[in-house]
Amino acid sequence: MSRIIVVSNRIGPIEEGKAAPGGLAVGVYEILRATGGVWFGWSGETVDQTPQAPSLQTQGNIAFATVGLGRKDYAEYYAGFSNATLWPLLHYRTGLIEFSRDSLAGYLRVNEQFAAHLARLIEPGDIVWVHDYHLIPLGAALRRRGVTQRIGFFLHTPLPPRAVMRTLPDHRQIFGTLSAYDVVGFQTADDADHFSDYMVRELGASRQGARLALDSRLFKAGVFPIGIDPDDFARTAAVAVGQSATRRLIRSLGERPLVIGVDRLDYSKGLPFRFRAIENLLGQHPEWRNRCTFLQVATLSRTDVKQYRELRAELDAAAGHINGRYADYDWTPIRYVNRSFNRNTLAGFFRHARVGLVTPLRDGMNLVAKEYVAAQRPEDPGVLVLSQFAGAANELESALLVNPFDVGGVAQAIIRALEMPLPERTDRWRAMMETLRRNTVRDWARRFVESLTANRADMRPAALSGA
């Protein structure tokens, strides 16, 4: 099998034996160990001067290549165009887009810098797998440097419809470069359809069977929903439920069932609507006061961005208002925590929770939903309440699917989950667990690489001169 070059904004853990933090790291690491290769990405450090070459570390047959970002590059490429422009756009939040030509220039500049480093690492016969919205133009930059090897791209976020994509100034300059890839992968069929529609109606691509043709190039859009390792997470949860953190949580709850949400503090996660749903439940259904507890873990994120600071202040105020109105001397309805917990601790929390509340306004996949399902006790599983706008809803159809904007409907779904009899809970859990086992994170990585290997485009670098 060909050697693989994986490119992502950040790379997974380098230390041998260190637990991988998420789906991308698990799937990529496994396939790199099988084939050998290079994992290239930003080191996470800002530096005074742009490095001339990446720093290399090896672990077995994998080389980890990292580069620091200059302070201007960080501000324009990462904090600016990636997170203040593309992130809200891709999550359908056009009113939050902050666009500047300086940040666009920085985004393109860093992708060119990454391409220059990568072109020197790529060998004949390699295949290149690029990840996520930070690196959309990277494939075209590599093609301009004469790279003819197979290059694939996978978008972990949603991709909005053409009308939303067009709100980005110079959108063709960004999204048009996706034609440089042989395979462009998405989480859901809707995302792939939006991509094909944009390419055809906006850029003039034509359909040729399962492929698209544009400027003498053939490329394919594919659907590859990312998974987890459900059996490994189940084993972790079974052990973690007996550890000190989970035992403390259980003691503090008494006999009250736990409703849990775990998210990064981000406006795409719908946390203000979720808090309003809890307020609706307590206000419209007083019989549930002092009978259940909602724990929301919201890890702080992008604290240097104004919208995130405002979101934190809004949630602080909402939690205080709800607790002030409904708390009793021995019970607090919302436990709102802005710290992070390790994977083992969260697995134990999930296993004890009667309801997993995953209600993003828009999400590419949402692996928390899958982890919650995997963590459950087979003999007494909890219930997943899941937003219909999360990519996971396309697979976990036995969850209670909700519209996160309908706070009353979400409140009703929580009550239904709390009251659901064991046979129904068990049937729903088994159906979802079977789905998770059919599409693990390793299956996801293998399927993408197999598709990329089988779908070589007609590579004519001259056709990309204007990409």
Image: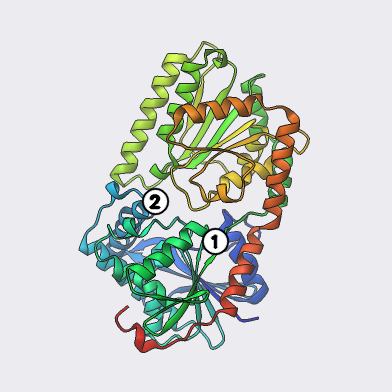
Residue 161's mark?
none
> In the displayed structure, would residue 30 be above or below residue 97?
below
Q: Name the residue furthest top.
A: 329
Q: Is residue 16 visible?
A: no
Residue 21, image x, y percentages = 57, 53
Q: Which residue is located at x 34 percent, y 54 percent?
A: 89
Residue 91's mark?
2
Say which of 137 and 420 sits in front: 420
CA–CA distance in space, label 2 to label 1: 24 Å
Quadrant showing the N terminus: bottom right
Q: Which residue is located at x 64 percent, y 68 percent?
A: 446
User: Which residue type carries mark 1?
Assistant: Gly
Specify whether 319 is left or right of 380: left
Q: Is residue 313 visible?
A: yes
Q: Secondary structure at mark 1?
A: loop
Find residue 312 and report its image quarter.
Answer: top left
User: Which residue type carries mark 2?
Assistant: His
Residue 29, image x, y percentages = 61, 65
Residue 314, image x, y percentages = 34, 31
Task: Using a 10 Å C-alpha cutoff, classify the residue at mark 2 as few (fewer than 14 neighbours), some (14 to 19) or many (20 or more).
Answer: some
Say which of 236 and 196 sits in front: 196
Quadrant showing the C terminus: bottom left
Q: Nearer the viewer, mark 2 or mark 1?
A: 2
Say which of 251 and 34 sits in front: 34
Residue 12's mark?
1
Name the N-terminal-most of marks 2 and 1: 1
Q: Name the residue furthest left.
A: 101
Counting every numbered tag in the picture gives 2
